Image (cartoon, grey):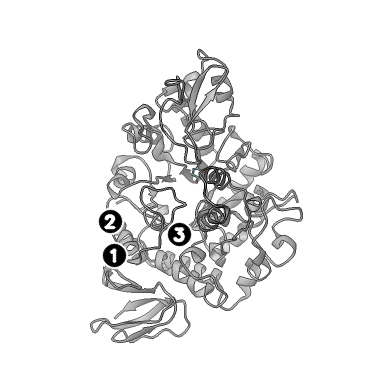
Amino acid sequence: MEKKWWHSSVVYQIYPRSFQDSNGDGVGDIQGIIQRLDYLADLGIDAIWLSPVYQSPNDDNGYDISDYQAISSEFGTMDDMEELINEANKLNIRIVMDLVVNHTSDEHAWFIESSKSKDNDYRDYYIWRDAQNNDVPNELKSIFSGSAWELDEQTNQYYLHLYSKKQPDLNWENPKVRNEIWEMMNFWLDKGIGGFRMDVIDLIGKVPDELITGNGPMLHTYLQEMHQETFGKLDVLTVGETWGVTTEDAKLYSASERNELSMVFQFEHISLDEQPGKPKWDTQPLDFIKLKQVFTKWQLALDGDGWNSLFWNNHDIPRIVSSWGNDSPQYRRVSAKMFATFLHFLKGTPYIYQGEEIGLTNTPISSIDEANDIESLNMYKERLNEGYNKKDIIQSINKKGRDNARRPIPWDDSLNGGFTTGTPWLALNPNYKELNVKEDRQNKESIFNYYKELIRLRKEHDLIVWGSYKELLPNDPQLFVYERSYQDETWLIIINFYEKATIYKNQDQKVDTIIISNYSDSGKNLEQLSLRPFESVVYKLD
Ligand code: NOJ
């Protein structure tokens, strides 16, 4: 496999609304990010995945774009954006833009034209269908609740929206649409960006009349065309968001000879607390053995053929230290470091979501007035109508709601955590006085410093990037144990996933050194090794 920069990189995701406000309007912005580049350079990351900063009416916080070639005035100007790309590049940090091309905003000029009349030149940029028996064209559902079809009264046809009704789906079957997108991507590539994160890219090959949404028959043909028409000759990172992907699909996307993407995000591990076939709100307890099986399956399946992305968190997923870990004052730090150790020694490209590097926690709400996210608000209405009680709905939102990850970053313990001098668009987690960047970096148990060390290790050791993977003790109910080997070196990673203490035994392994641990005094005797709550250690074996 040809070695690329992104194989050995760590990517940091910025959700710009919540990162750093520079002008006191309560919304994070591009100048705010520029102010914090030194912080990111210190952490050691190689690229920033920047969630959308384009012009948008913000029905879905920027994932509804009304102009792909303009910056939202809340975030700044095109000059600010160019400054960010250049300043980041000076620090060897590449900017990976969010590419949201499954849908646009209904306020995009294309959709405004498209909805004017059935014979408008832009009509076929979107997916329009006649009513069926005075009702919606078919039973496709929106991921944000309700039917995926919305009636346009003026032309008396329905348009498809797999997300909110302000996010009409583009018609990828139309070559004009594809060409517009290639042109727009090239506009950004010419500015020197480091690649694209592609929003729900698995949906672009949909065949709505056959109820096919993900993984449609033309999907890979479109991606190969994209590769050829846009970034194919450039050294960039491309990562597709693909919810229902299997390991076989992932190879189609990411094997280098296929000329599609660098890698995909798969969500099999993170969806294990959801009941198969049910909405994400209907959770079930995490099955740890399955979690290990999923990781091992992906590690082995993409070895040498394709590439894994590695993540616990993003702007759609609650904070892992709260959902599957322990965010109590006693264990938050070791628990957060346990998740980091678990992931950062696997083969693939790790992604850190803003605030993860200081162990930020979820923010439970007690009433729907405290929620902002359209997904939670729509689900609340839908479930109230279906007869659920409010308390249960709020409980689901606290478990799976996206606002958990979207609260502004607390930089210090001053008013609004130094995020803004104005009124934050979404309240900070009330724990920000104790839990903020400044406090963490000063603490001798700093999570930030731990992440920094993980990133440094990846830069220094080819074993982490290229070594083979072998899982041990697959049936152990609380330990995740794996080895990575490269040339004649083997590292052993032992993760105690739970608070309960336990013992690891292996007569054949001898320790050379401890590479990293979330306790300062981890044992070295693998014949009989005691592990404390969440204790996670990486050994170089003798
Ligand atoms: C996935 C994005 O991550 C999410 O935030 C967004 O709501 C949907 N795609 C729709 O664009």
The amino acid at mark 2 is Asp
Task: Answer with left or right where residue 14 lies relative to residue 261.
Answer: right
Percent x, y for residue 233? 40, 39
Mark with earlier residue (3, 2): 2
Residue 469: numbered disc: 1
Mark 3: secondary structure: loop
Q: Residue at the front extreme?
A: 387
Percent x, y for residue 530? 37, 85
Mark 2: secondary structure: loop
The amino acid at mark 1 is Tyr
Inspect this view and state whether residue 232 appears. Answer: no
Question: Label 1 vs label 3: CA separation?
Answer: 19 Å
The amino acid at mark 3 is Trp
Percent x, y for residue 265? 40, 50
Question: Label 3 vs label 2: CA separation?
Answer: 20 Å
Verify CB contact (< 8 Å) between mark 3 and mark 2: no
Pointer 2 residue Cβ closer than 8 Å to ligand 1: no
Mark 1: secondary structure: strand
Residue at image mark 2: 303
At x 57% / y 41%, what residue is drawn?
A: 60
Residue 266: numbered disc: none
294 or 5: nearer the viewer: 294
Question: Label 2 vs label 1: CA separation?
Answer: 9 Å
Mark with earlier residue (1, 3): 3
Q: Residues within 10 Å of mark 3 (few under 14, many from 20)?
A: many
Residue 312: numbered disc: 3
Q: Residues within 10 Å of mark 1 (few under 14, many from 20)?
A: many
Percent x, y for residue 368? 62, 51
Pointer 1 residue Cβ closer than 8 Å to ligand 1: no
60 or 40: nearer the viewer: 60
Task: Answer with left or right where residue 100 lies relative to residue 472.
Answer: right
Mark with earlier residue (2, 1): 2
